[in-house]
Image (cartoon, rainbow, N blue to C red):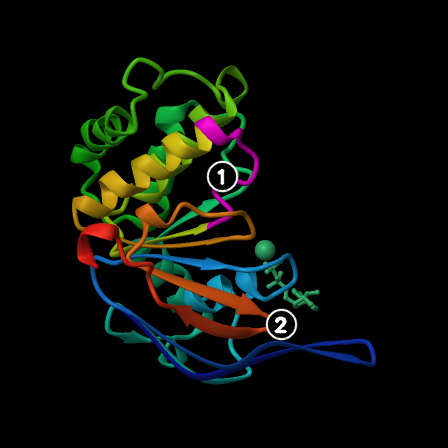
Amino acid sequence: MIEIQQLEKYYETTGERVHALKNTNLSINQGENVVIVGKSGSGKSTLLNMISGIDRPSSGSITVNGQNLNDLKENELALWRGSNIGIVFQFYQLLPTLSALDNVLFAMSLVNKIPTKERKAKATRHLEEVGLGDKISKFPNELSGGERQRVAIARAIANDPAIIIADEPTGNLDSKTGEQINNLFDKLNAEGTTILTVTHAHIDHVHYDKVIHIEDGILNEMMQPQTEAAL
Ligand code: ADP
Ligand code: MG
């Protein structure tokens, strides 16, 4: 689902060169639920921006859902991203003047993948799926942080993406609400969606198929702790 080979990313700012990702190789299979854990500044958001095509690598190749991103021009990348990747951010990034339902519908209209006639029913179903069936008409400022993040997740799945990437999705939520969001990701994953989350926080290993650490732009896959039953 995601294949990254020998990726390097440098940021060039005035007179300074930051080596944000170093010889990065990563392979994520369809249906996996993967987390990348690392401190602030270790390169997590940079990596997600490479995978979603928001930014380009300095060198190396990235293939996502069968598409080599090097082969796409900027305008093609934006459309490709909209129909292949659902993105969830720490601060939700909902449009404040739109209701929950309209936030999801707007994402559909940008990509034009879901037939117009089916959109409203489908968006409503996504909001029901995240437990907000009774709040589809609410505006973001009428919703709690956890509810806003649920709307963002409903929006992320609006165009039936092959993969969801989430950048610190529970970073602004209390631990109980964060756990509810993680359970929701588990549910989507059980339904077949590939999920890649990055976080600097302590993680609960039970949620993930694969745990990868990142430090100073270097990835390191960890062995999953064996459960007692498997020993
Ligand atoms: P994380 O998401 O793990 O906190 P980032 O990927 O945002 O880390 O940043 C990795 C490194 O790249 C940091 O040293 C950061 O300062 C640097 N960096 C990130 N974005 C830019 C940018 N647009 N220009 C210059 N340096 C950047
Ligand atoms: Mg970040």
The residue lying at 33 percent from left, 59 percent from top is: 225
Label 1 neighbour load within 10 Å: few <14, some 14-19, many 20+ = many
Kindly state the secondary structure of the residue where label 1 is placed.
Answer: loop
Amino acid type at mark 2: Asp
Residue 45, given in percent of the width and then of the height, sits at: 55, 60
| Residue at the spot of label 2 | 216
Mark 2 to mark 1 CA distance (whole Å) = 22 Å
Kindly state the secondary structure of the residue where label 2 is placed.
Answer: loop
| Residue at the spot of label 1 | 170
Q: Is residue 107 visible?
A: yes
The residue lying at 18 percent from left, 51 percent from top is: 229
The magenta span reads 167-176
Q: Tell me the quarter of the image containing the N terminus.
A: bottom left
Taking depth in this image into account, of 60 and 71 the one nearest to the observer is: 60
Taking depth in this image into account, of 128 and 99 the one nearest to the observer is: 128
Q: Is residue 148 visible?
A: no
